[in-house]
Image (cartoon, rainbow, N blue to C red):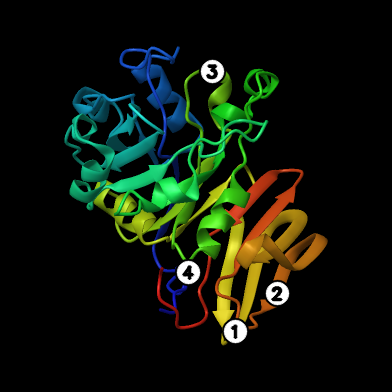
Amino acid sequence: MRNNPYCNNEGTWLRGSFHGHCVEHSACASIPLAESVANYENIGAGFVAITDHDHITDLSETEKNHPNLVLLQGFEYSSRENMIFVGKHVEPLFKLPLEEAIAKGSDLLTVIVHPRPHADGRDYWTKPMIEELGVLPDGIEVYNGHYGIATAVARGRQPLYAEFWDEMLTAGHRLWGFANDDFHDPEDFDNAYNMVLVNEVSQFGVIQAAKSGRCYASTGLQLESVSLDENTINVVVDAPCKGTFIGPGGQILSSAQETTNFDYIGNNEAYIRFQGEGETGRIFLQPMWLQDTEER
């Protein structure tokens, strides 16, 4: 199945995080709900999800105080390796086995979070574990802002999971990549986010766009444009960076330094994705499948 999630660039870009906690319902968090949401509105976010551990936080009063911000319900499934469930209205699926929860939450955004959190390489999520779920989630975090702060890194955490993403993509699993603050503490805000291209500014619009890959992950580097003409991919970003096109097995297909404009001509790769890193941060575009292939 040929797939380019950026084939239609009409809509509105919204910035936001799908993963975060408040002190009222997550013992690991230190920021009250009202302060967290206000922080996101102050940095220009268009949406934010509250995903407390095995708890669905009531956002009805918060919505009244922030009518211009799309607020999403959710929870972080935490009784085993973690996954977030996000939507307009979310049922307490965390009471079910994870396999059953994913199957029943097909209308929700489901994302495996911090799949490789340990700098020493210890397993957390593995490819066989994900495959054994039966129904695959929509995506995985490729960057987690909470695990990227200095205190987390000093404790042996690591925030970057692009290599594991490539492992899953190489196996034929079409998972989207996401970057989230996973906010718990003051230093977490504005570390990682997603830009989502929505057809309508609403809870439904955000979830629909994210589930279809009309988005990209960032820690600061912004996308100006992305296009596909025949098999030529062109990516333009807003600041000079090292930009890399990556294919199966994490192979570097093409790389260029200190520029904002990148091109690559596809050559029968099973998938191609672009990532960049510069002074302003990182960017991860969703993979493109230029050949007619079936997901395995």
Of tags 4 and 1, the one toward the viewer is 1
Q: How crowded is mark 1: few (under 14 residues within 10 Å), some or many (20 or more)?
A: some
**Three-letter amino acid code at the position of disc 2:** Asp
Q: How crowded is mark 4: few (under 14 residues within 10 Å), some or many (20 or more)?
A: many
Label 4 to label 2, Cα distance in Å? 15 Å
Against 105, residue 114 (above or below) is above
Horizontally, residue 135 falls left or right of residue 120, namely left
Label 4 to label 1, Cα distance in Å? 14 Å
Q: Which mark is residue 263?
A: 2
Residue that numbered label 4 is attached to: 6
Q: Earlier in the sequence, mark 4 or mark 1?
A: 4
Q: What element carries label 2?
A: strand
Q: Where is residue 81 in the image (x, y as percent from the top left)?
A: 41, 33
**Three-letter amino acid code at the position of disc 4:** Tyr
Q: Which of marks 3 and 1 is nearer the N terminus?
A: 3
Residue that numbered label 3 is attached to: 186
Q: Position of residue 290 (x, y in %)?
A: 52, 79
Q: Which residue is drawn at 51% across and 39% down?
A: 115
Horizontally, residue 62 falls left or right of residue 225, namely left
**Three-letter amino acid code at the position of disc 1:** Asn
Q: Which of marks 1 and 2 is nearer the N terminus?
A: 1
Q: Where is residue 59 in the image (x, y as percent from the top left)?
A: 24, 27
Q: How crowded is mark 3: few (under 14 residues within 10 Å), some or many (20 or more)?
A: some
Residue that numbered label 1 is attached to: 231
